[in-house]
Amino acid sequence: METKGRARDEGGVGCAVSDFNNDGHLDICVPNYGHNALWRSNGDGTFTNVAAEAGVGIDNHAVGASWGDFDNDGFADLSVMSYEGPPNDQQPKNSLFHNIGGKTFVNVIDQVPLVNAGDHGVEWVDYNADGAIDLTLTDGYSPVGGHFVFRNDLPPLSLPAVSAFWCLMPKGISPAQA
């Protein structure tokens, strides 16, 4: 790929791939320094950036993203890792986008502020095999760094309030103690 370069506050450092609208074609999210991009597959080898109308095209300093269906409704939700602040004083400023029927997204991070803890790596995995996908984050800008795992306590195939299903699992605490 050839490009002319980019300004320091533009571009991205990764991508996340999923079929967010369940049309059978893989779509691409690019978390950016600036506005995120969400490239919806047109099904013919081309893509259209639908980030603004889908609600994920926010202005941020994003460095990582991952798709996972945290509420088991059949539509992939999106976690985006971002940070703000001057060098040596960066703070996480993440987004947790709930997928509404494969058309739009709502940022629900304010309902689960506990997961606004990472600033770089993010991945979804069902670490305890309970049918509810869990979230893992890395924090590289704090004085000590960290790796966090958040257990999803949302019962499979239900959709209660988003604010009640996360539990921090810091290093050294077993699931039985949480």
Image: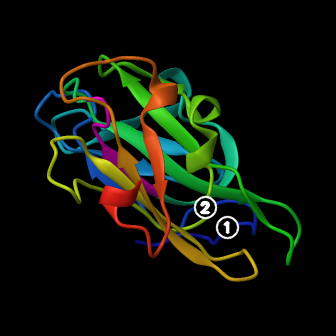
Q: State left or right for residue 24 relative to residue 165.
A: left
Image quadrant assignment for residue 89: bottom right
Helix, strand or loop at mark 1: loop
Q: Amino acid at mark 1?
A: Arg
114 versus 125 height, above or below: above
25 versus 121 height, above or below: above
> Looking at the image, can residue 165 be seen?
yes
Task: Say whether residue 162 is magenta.
Answer: no
Q: Residue at x 74, y 66 (%)?
A: 7
39 versus 175 height, above or below: above
**Tag 2 residue:** 11
What residue span does the magenta drawing correspond to?
A: 65-71
Q: Which mark is residue 6?
A: 1
Whole-percent x and y of residue 174? Answer: 35, 66
Q: Residue at x 49, y 54 (%)?
A: 168
163 versus 167 height, above or below: above
Q: Residue at x 10, y 34 (%)?
A: 24
Whole-percent x and y of residue 163? Answer: 52, 27
Q: Amino acid at mark 2?
A: Gly
Q: Residue at x 75, y 69 (%)?
A: 8
Mark sitting earlier along the chain (1/2): 1
Q: State left or right for residue 40 relative to residue 86.
A: left
Helix, strand or loop at mark 2: loop
Image quadrant assignment for residue 131: top left
Q: Nearer the viewer, mark 1 or mark 2?
A: 2
Q: Nearer the viewer, residue 145 or 99?
A: 145
Q: Are marks 1 and 2 in contact (CB under 8 Å)?
A: yes
Q: State left or right for residue 140 relative to residue 76.
A: right
